[in-house]
Amino acid sequence: MLSDLNNCTGCGACNNVCPTDAINMKANDEGFLIPVVNYDKCINCGSCERVCSKDKTAKTTEPLIVYAARNKDYEIRKNSSSGGVFYVIGELFLKNGGIVYGVSFDDDFVVKHKRIENIEGLKSLQGSKYVQSDTGYSFRKVKEDLQKGRKVLFSGTPCQVSGLLECLNGLDKSNLTTIDILCHGVGSPLVWHDYIRVLSNSENKISDINFRNKKIGWHRFCFSYKNNRSEKVVMFADDFYCNLYDKHYILRPACFECKYSKYFHESDITIGDFWGVDKLMPDMDDNMGTSVLFLNNKKGIEILNRVDGLEKVEISKEMALKYNINSPSFLPKDRDDFWEKYNNETYDYICNNYFESSLKIKAKHLLKELLIKFNYSW
């Protein structure tokens, strides 16, 4: 029986493993999915508690090898969030009759895990989605695929990979390869859905969204969306949703105590942006994306050795993390106030009180510098 959901990551392991389907994942007041138990169906078997990883120490080891890597295909890299590494690994599995699980938008831009069996479907898994994905019953489907002898590549956040592995405990996982990401945190589906409604209407239906548009390059990426009239491209910090995400107001509470914020991961392979590559390895930077790639075990090394189409250079883990994520996301002091206001005030109120454009931030910093220069207190 589940209790104390404060640190729940929403991975969905509990409802995937429940033998009587007594657990459903439902949105809380912040829009994050949490398990809700139907006690009429519950048989107190303890399966949900066994797979719940929220209070468990991560089963992690240091990576064996770390690379700076990028896809040699410029177009694939252009349409990827970073260096296009996931695409080429997914391609390897699909060309050899395997299955790939990853995160995709549905027709209404709801973020969900998706099972694909062809290269065309792989394109829908490209690119970051800064919204927590609904894993649905994908863990059950992975188990079914493995039991049929299929080779499976599963990608997700570190906590989702952990949840999957707990569900598969005791099963032969030799045909399973897992990829997770250097994760900043997962954004609220509620805020995302509300924002989609703001952007879209009957006359201007959204047809495409890109959280990491590289129109002005990878270093200063943009958020973009298309409708039937035009495409709008704005700096990440100047978009309402992205701004709130970047200021951590809309991250899941569990993200503030993340167990996977350094280089200790349970996956076979960990992928992230190689921030700082322009300073550390300028020859590997053309402003179209370079990935940092952690191979966490022998399986990860074996998979990468079978991949064609990557340019890679071995680096130290210290170099990889010098400018990258190495601690949990900070908890805003006024986060509770934000959510009280978000659920009770208007969109305009939230914009006026919590959204700061990049120009407003620059002006604020300039004013602060001037006050310090002339000995005024801030």
Image (tube, grey):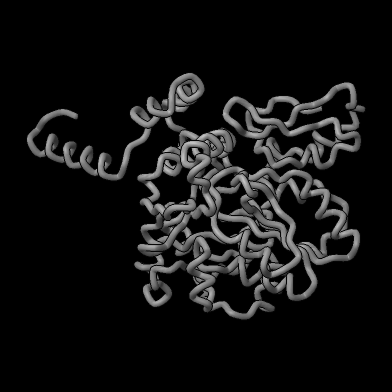
The quadrant of the image that shows the N terminus is: top right
List x then y, in percent, for residue 30.
Answer: 57, 29
Taking the view exactly as shown, the residue that stands out farthest to the front is 203
- Number of numbered markers: 0
Question: Viewed as shown, does residue 144 lie left or right of 196?
Answer: right
The quadrant of the image that shows the C terminus is: top left
Q: Is residue 157 visible?
A: no
Q: In this orientation, which residue lies closer to the viewer: 18 or 97?
A: 97
Q: In this orientation, which residue lies closer to the viewer: 59 or 170?
A: 170
Residue at horizontal 51 percent and vertical 22 percent from the top? 343
List x then y, in percent, for residue 45.
Answer: 90, 32
Residue 126 occupies quadrant: bottom right
Residue at horizontal 69 percent and vertical 78 percent from the top? 306
List x then y, in percent, for residue 48.
Answer: 81, 35
Question: Viewed as shown, does residue 25 lie left or right of 214?
Answer: right
Residue at horizontal 71 percent and vertical 45 percent from the top? 135
Q: In this orientation, which residue lies closer to the viewer: 213 or 155?
A: 213
**Up/down of 339 relative to 245, above or below:** above
Q: Is residue 209 visible?
A: yes
**Up/down of 289 relative to 45, above or below:** below
Residue 244 occupies quadrant: top left
List x then y, in percent, for residue 47.
Answer: 85, 36
Residue at horizontal 80 percent and vertical 72 percent from the top? 97
